[in-house]
Amino acid sequence: QQQVKQSPQSLIVQKGGIPIINCAYENTAFDYFPWYQQFPGKGPALLIAIRPDVSEKKEGRFTISFNKSAKQFSLHIMDSQPGDSATYFCAASMLDYGQNFVFGPGTRLSVLP
Amino acid sequence: NAGVTQTPKFQVLKTGQSMTLQCAQDMNHEYMSWYRQDPGMGLRLIHYSVGAGITDQGEVPNGYNVSRSTTEDFPLRLLSAAPSQTSVYFCASSYFQGLAGPTDTQYFGPGTRLTVL
């Protein structure tokens, strides 16, 4: 019930493409869904986050789509650039779990020039 | 602001040895946590603390101890290292909002890569 599933495991797109990374969860008590970006040799950094009272959130070229009934959320990267090449993690948290996050296994994105 | 700092960056241990991974933050964050990152498994919570003198277990606490004597520092101790503890360890910190819910200001350190032979 605590698990967050993430797909695909890896993704290769051309510059300008729109990679989409999907996550799914089981526990309906989750109420906060962040995405983290991690470059090699660095710690994860918060990219964008959403709460279940909205279906979409945009920040720059990054968009989260949220489907509460399907218990799924996804990250879209518009006009992707080689600098977006990184590993992306979705995560979930809930009130009863304090501020502890359950992370997906990660998606390695490569954006080709 | 140095943010969240971790030392050492790399460490090699032999089975049975003990060591302490250091974590410090200068943002006056109440909440601190330790995660381990293994290929294909994302990050898994080891221990966390909501303030000085308060610690609790996460998802994978066995073989690890923590203490929180100050707001700034949150060391992670490996009592008797095992090859299964080979991993990259990340410390994170944020303001604690308690029942108000999670915060979006969780900062991660650069990580410690540990190899246990």
Image (spheres, coloured by chain):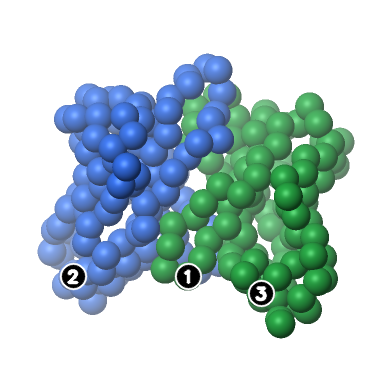
Task: Say above or below: B104 vs B62.
Answer: above
> Could you tell me which quadrant the C terminus of chain A lies in?
bottom right
Q: Secondary structure at mark 1?
A: loop
Q: Residue at x 59, y 65 (%)?
A: A87
Residue B13 numbered mark, or none = 2
Q: Chain of mark 3?
A: A
- Mark 2 vs mark 1, CA separation in Å: 23 Å
Palette colour of chain A: green
Location of residue A79 (image quadrant): bottom right
User: Would residue A63 be found to the left or right of residue A1 on screen?
Assistant: right
Q: Position of residue A31 (x, y in %)?
A: 67, 30
**Residue contact at pointers 2 and 3, CB within 8 angstroms:** no
- Residue B91 picture location, percent across and down: 35, 48
Q: Residue at x 76, y 31 (%)?
A: A52
Tag 3: Cα neighbours inside 10 Å, few (<14), some, or many (≥20)? some
In the figure, the shade used to draw chain B is blue
Q: Which residue is mark 3?
A: A82
Amino acid type, label 3: Pro
From what the image shows, is residue A42 above or below residue B2? below
> Circle 2 marks a residue in which chain?
B
Q: Is residue A58 left or right of residue B36?
A: right
- CA gap, disc 1 and disc 3: 14 Å
**Dot 3: what SS?**
helix
The quarter in which the N terminus of chain A is drawn is top right
- Residue A20 sits in quarter: bottom right
Q: Amino acid at mark 2?
A: Leu
According to the picture, the residue beneath numbered tag 1 turns out to be: A40
